[in-house]
Each structure stands twice: as structure tokens, then as C-alpha cells.
Image (tube, helix red, strand yellow):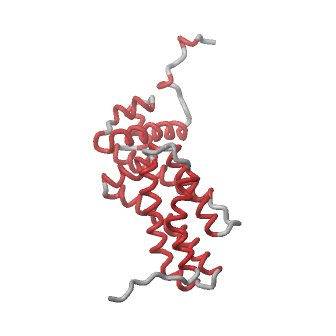
Amino acid sequence: MPDEDQRPPERARRLPRAVRERQILDAAVQVFSQHGYHSASMDEISEVAGVSKPMIYTYLGSKEDLFGKSIQREATRLLEAIQAGVQPDLPPDMQLWHGLRSFYRFVAEYRESWTVLHRQALTVGGGFAAEITAMRTRAIELVAALVVAAGTRKGLGEQTEFSGPGLAAALVGAAESLADWALDHPEISDGVLASWLMNLVWLGFNDLVEGQVWKPSEG
């Protein structure tokens, strides 16, 4: 049995492809979050991942491909975390609160992921921004379904089906802005952040499903 000095370095050890790809993507997310797409270098990603640049190109393609795959993976992880937090046996407002808690918990635990998704991808634009738009659309659909469910329980399903998608888009936008703010305020817990947003937004939703609609005064 060789002693530790004779073992091949970590960079040279053979690992399953899936493990290597995860290792490379983890490094890419870290580097992209720190430097942005344009300033990030494949040399640094290679160094952080502990693999050669040719191996990165073989497994995941060019820098553009790597950035795209990083966005896809982090977007999937984020949506899966939110969906896992939504408990379908609870009333719609509690489902949403738990989903928001999961969202803010993900942002706190995976700051680099959120930075790549919310800041870097949108800055680069193009197909990368389209991937974020698709993620946001899925989040809006999830929230809209909860709004419609709440309205249907009150006998106002048709009204909330009309307004639900727009209101859900407003909530998702507010949730993202609050998450960005929370990055600089890590002392605020996910439960408090979710409660703030529920008090700001869901109370208005509740008025709507109760049939109380604000209208501008004449004159």
C-alpha cells in the first residue's frame, strides 16, 4: 500500500463523470458569482475545481456552455427547494408562506447561486436571461395557482383567475427584491422575511378574494 506521499494528487484521481461535472459546476458557480461572466476565467475555474481545462471542455464545453449549465442547475435547485417547501395539505396562504421561507433559506445558504441567477445572468442577457425568465414564469405560475385556490375557496374563482397571474408576478418581483436586500442583512431569518412579504402582499390578496377591491376616487 503506497504511503500518502506516493498517492496521486487530487487533480489526477479518477472520479465518476457525474462527480466531476458537479465538482466543475460548483467551482464555476463560485467563480462566476465573484467575477461575473465576462471577467471569470477558465484558468481560475480549473484551479478551483482541481481539474485541467481540457477536462472542463470535454465534460461541459466552452465557457459559455459552462455558464449556461450553471444557470440551469441553480435554477432547478431553487425551484425544487421552493416546491418542496409548499405543503399541499395546508391553506393557500400557509403554502405560500412555507414556499417563501424555503426560497429565502435557499438564498441564505447558497448566496453564490442566487448571485449568479439574479445578478450575473440578467447582466449578461441573451439566452442566459431567457433561462431566468423561464424560471420566473414557473414561480409565477406556482403563486398564481395559490391565489386562484384561495379565491375559489371564497367563491371568487373567476375574478382571481383574471387577476391572479398579474398579482403573482408582482409578488415574485417583490420576493426577488427582498432576497437581494437580504444578502446584505444576513441577520434577518427566512421566517421573518417571509412574514414581511406576506403582510405586505397577501393581506391585499385576501382583501381581493373577500371581494374588497380598491378603486380610485373620482375627481
Q: Nearer the viewer, residue 122 or 128?
A: 122
> In the image, is 102 to the left or to the right of 218?
right
- The quarter holding residue 48 reads top left
x%, y% of residue 214? Answer: 46, 81
Pick the quarter of the image with the N terminus: top right
Quarter placement of the C terminus: bottom left
In the rendered view, tell whether residue 12 sits above or below residue 128: above
With 62 as the anchor, is 201 left or right in this view? right
Instruction: Identify the residue at horizontal 50%, vertical 64% (top origin).
Output: 139
Vertical relation: 194 (above or below) 66: below
The image quadrant of residue 41 is top left
The image shows residue 204, relative to residue 64, as above or below, that is below
Q: Going 63% across and 64% down the picture, which residue do you hit? A: 95
- Where does residue 162 sit, x and y in percent of width and height? 49, 82
Kindly identify the residue that appears in the image at 49 percent across and 70 percent down. Answer: 168
Residue 178: percent from the left, percent from the top?
A: 45, 55
